[in-house]
Amino acid sequence: SNETNITIAKGYMFLLSDYHELSFDSRYIGVVEINKTISLMKPSYLF
């Protein structure tokens, strides 16, 4: 198996997007401090 378990430290988050295959997210930049974020995105429509 190629699975890896990681623990994200308190105060950080792992950003992940499936919007586009070339999304620039935590897979490339690593974890991000929560207090450095501008806003959070929430789904407006679920189906």
Image (cartoon, rainbow, N blue to C red):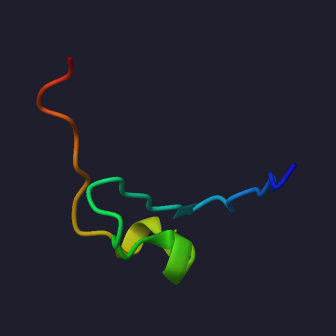
> Looking at the picture, does residue 22 appear above or below residue 1?
below
Task: Please provide percent x and percent y for residue 19.
Answer: 26, 55
Q: Nearer the viewer, residue 45 or 31?
A: 45
**Residue at the top extreme of this rendering:** 47
* Quadrant of the image containing the C terminus: top left
Q: Is residue 9 left or right of residue 17?
A: right
Task: Give the residue drawn at x 82%, y 55%.
Answer: 2
Q: Nearer the viewer, residue 4 or 43?
A: 4
Task: Please provide percent x and percent y for residue 24.
Answer: 37, 76
Q: Nearer the viewer, residue 20 or 16?
A: 20
Give the total of numbered labels: 0
> Looking at the picture, does residue 45 appear above or below residue 43?
above
Task: Please provide percent x and percent y for residue 25.
Answer: 42, 71
Task: Give the residue drawn at x 35%, y 65%.
Answer: 21
Q: Is residue 25 left or right of residue 6?
A: left
**Residue at the left extreme of this rendering:** 44
Task: Please provide percent x and percent y for residue 42.
Answer: 22, 40
**Residue at the right extreme of this rendering:** 1
Hey, which quadrant is residue 46 in on the image? top left
Task: Give the residue drawn at x 23%, y 69%.
Answer: 38
